[in-house]
Amino acid sequence: MKYLITRFREYIEEQEKNREAYEKTSYWASENNTCARQIFWKWKKEKQTNPPSVTGLQIMRTGRKVEEQIVEDWNKMGILVSPPEGQDQHYIETERFGVRITGKLDAIIKETTEDGKEIETPVEIKSYYGDYQEYRLFDLQPNESYAKQLAIYMDALNKDRGILYMVNRGSGRQFQFIVTRKPKKYKIEVATYVREDDNPDNETERLEFKVGFLEFTLEDAYNHFAEVDKYVKANKLPSAQFQYKYPITLQSLKLRKNNAISKARTGKAVLGDWQCKYCSYKAKCLKEQEIELGYSKEEQQLLIELTKGYTTKQWRE
Ligand code: SF4
């Protein structure tokens, strides 16, 4: 008898294979930092050369369910503003810099301000896993493209306040980032429960807060879409926005972390932008640039040579 785990993987694989290529008719708010080439190829309905693996698909599906569960709970709490009839989410559509931008907002919730005013706040939920991500969240550094995505929705809805709600799929820890629109920047305030064991009565004592600023402008995102749009209309491939392999020079290598260098030295990874690592058009893009996948023998040798003693202080100096 076939293992259930295998049957499930095959089912997911089959579903993905039969999925119709998406007809793109707008730029998505979530693509605010996506490589121009990727967006271009999506518009042109190019077949992905590196589609997500079954494991990748399972991660995405699990993440989506976690986010849906939270919205369902908010609905039961009676704080959710229902999407318009016939829609499962709030559909956002706007035009900026002559380009149509759309997105699906996870939730709009009802809140009451200190002075008793009823307000409606857009909320974008993202799930994540891993200690590194969590460390960045504690340090007030959520992924900038998530914050920009929310900011685009806030702009479309003309709201000065939004919430980026993040949940760890492993530990269950949740972060609430209040994003407030200010002239030229966004104030960000994070709140998370850190002292559940002590369980003090006062909410502010149970929560940890931090406040800072996110320095980005929406003009950057809108310009990005408008720029890609020129290439789409001219049917011309934009240049590669990210680097699959960083140049193998001492200067460039010294910017990399020890564990990344270690992986590169042992041939387990190349040193490059993560966007290329996970890109679904990687093979196509590398072929077009005449870049070899992985390191050649010569490149590997040079890398090993230049990174001799990389764990020492002297090498970093
Ligand atoms: S491989 Fe890198 S540069 Fe090429 S399309 Fe993908 S993300 Fe862009």
Image (cartoon, grey):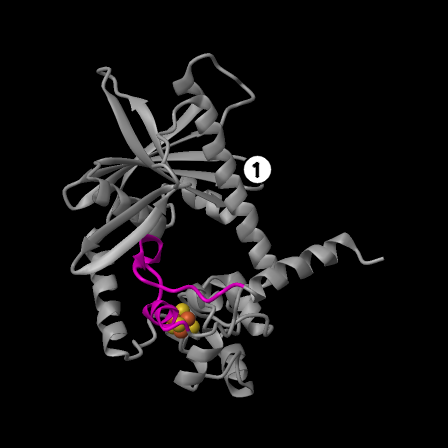
Secondary structure of the residue carrying tag 1 is loop
Q: Give the residue type at disc 1.
A: Ser
Measuring from the top left, give residue 261's x and y in whole percent.
51, 68
As drawn, 170 above or below 54? above
- The picture quadrant where one finds residue 56 is bottom right
Residue tagged 1 = 171
Viewer-proximal residue, 265 or 310? 265
Q: From the image, which quarter does the N terminus lie in?
A: bottom right
- The picture quadrant where one finds residue 267 is bottom right
Q: From the image, which quarter does the C terminus lie in?
A: bottom left
Measuring from the top left, give residue 21's x and y in whole percent.
46, 67
Kindly tell me whether residue 130 is visible in this rendering: no
Q: Residue at x 28, y 29 (%)?
A: 120
Residue 196 covered by magenta stretch: no
Crowding near pointer 1: few (<14 within 10 Å), some, many (20+)? few
Residue lying at the far right in this picture: please name it. 1
Q: Which residues are magenta?
A: 19-45
Viewer-proximal residue, 160 or 94? 94
Q: How many dots with numbers?
A: 1
As drawn, 203 above or below 33? above
Q: Residue at x 30, y 60 (%)?
A: 26
